[in-house]
Structure formats: C-alpha cells, structure tokens
Amino acid sequence: MKTKLMVLLFVAGIALSMPPANAEVGYIDYQRVLENYPAAQQAMKDLDAKGLELQQYMLEKERQYKNLSTPLQKQNFETQTQNELKSKQESLYKLQQDKEMQILNQVKTAARAVMVAQKLDAVVSDQVVFVGGVDITDQVIQKLK
C-alpha cells in the first residue's frame, strides 16, 4: 500500500511538472532588438560620450604631469589622479549597469505584452531555441517604438 502511494505521488509530480502538450514558446533576438530600439541606441551614444570624456581627462592629466618638476609633486599628482580616475571609472561602470538594466526591463515589459497578446507560455532568447518556437522579435521592436 505504501509503495503504491509513493508511485502514485511520483507519477502525479512528474505529470504536474511537465508543460502542457500545446505549450507555445516565443523567442526574441535580443541583439536585433537593441539594434532597432532607439532608447538602446541613445544609451550607447551616452556611454560612448562618457568614455570619450574619460579619455580626454586622461590626456589632460598626462599634459599636467609632464609640467611637474619634482618627484614629490609627481608622486602626489599620481596618487590624486589615480583616486580621481578610479572614481570616474566606477561612475561610468555604474552608469553602464543602470542603462543596461533600464533597457533590459523595457524589453522584458514589451516581450511580456507580446507574450500575453500572442497567448504564449514563455519567451526565451533565440540563442536557446534549437528547433521550433515563434519568433516575436519584430513585435517586440514595434512595441518598444
């Protein structure tokens, strides 16, 4: 009796964990979405501009360093510049993370809306789909615009 109950619970658990036979999965080409999403393009431009500012900062610091005469001045300047550079790099990294998270959340929201409209059970990246599924990349791009 106990063995029959265990087998019955095991079979019921497997049956409940399996997706329905008619489950539909959508997939998106995330890279193509980013290439066609104006907000993502603007975020990239903003990050590139900040990176260029950092490069300009370093060039200016190199010029200033060359004008220093004593080893003590150079050492103090190096220490100060390293601290400032570290702060600027951390700021750029945080900005990059924030922008990526914003874009990802917006894409997820659009994908979720398309998933509901198309009556799909899930949306995954195109890189994990081997065969089958429904490509909803274009609908997600349209939703984002």
Image (cartoon, rainbow, N blue to C red):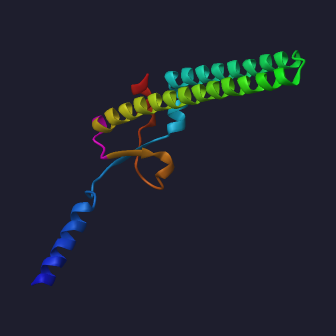
The verdict on residue 11 being magenta is: no
**In this orientation, which residue lies closer to the viewer: 94 or 123?**
94
Q: Determine the residue positioned at 82% across, 20% down.
A: 73
Left or right of 137, for residue 120: left
Left or right of 142, for residue 12: left
Which quadrant does the C terminus fall into?
top left
- Quadrant in the picture for residue 48: top right
Q: Determine the residue positioned at 74% across, 18% down.
A: 56
**In this orientation, which residue lies closer to the viewer: 140 or 78?**
78
* Residue stretch rendered in magenta on the structure: 117-121
Q: Determine the residue positioned at 71% across, 23% down.
A: 80
Q: Is residue 27 above or below residue 71?
A: below
Q: Is residue 57 above or below residue 99?
A: above
Q: Determine the residue positioned at 84% across, 19% down.
A: 65
Which residue sits furthest left?
A: 1
The verdict on residue 120 being magenta is: yes
| Position in image of residue 41 (x %, y %) | 56, 23
**In this orientation, which residue lies closer to the viewer: 127 or 47?**
47
| Position in image of residue 87 (x %, y %) | 62, 26
Which residue sits furthest front?
A: 72
Task: Count numbered badges in the picture.
Answer: 0
Q: Is residue 33 above or below residue 5?
A: above
| Position in image of residue 30 (x %, y %) | 50, 38
Which quadrant does the N terminus fall into?
bottom left
Left or right of 128, for residue 75: right
| Position in image of residue 139 (x %, y %) | 40, 32
- Per the picture, the main secondary structure of the magenta-coloured stretch is loop
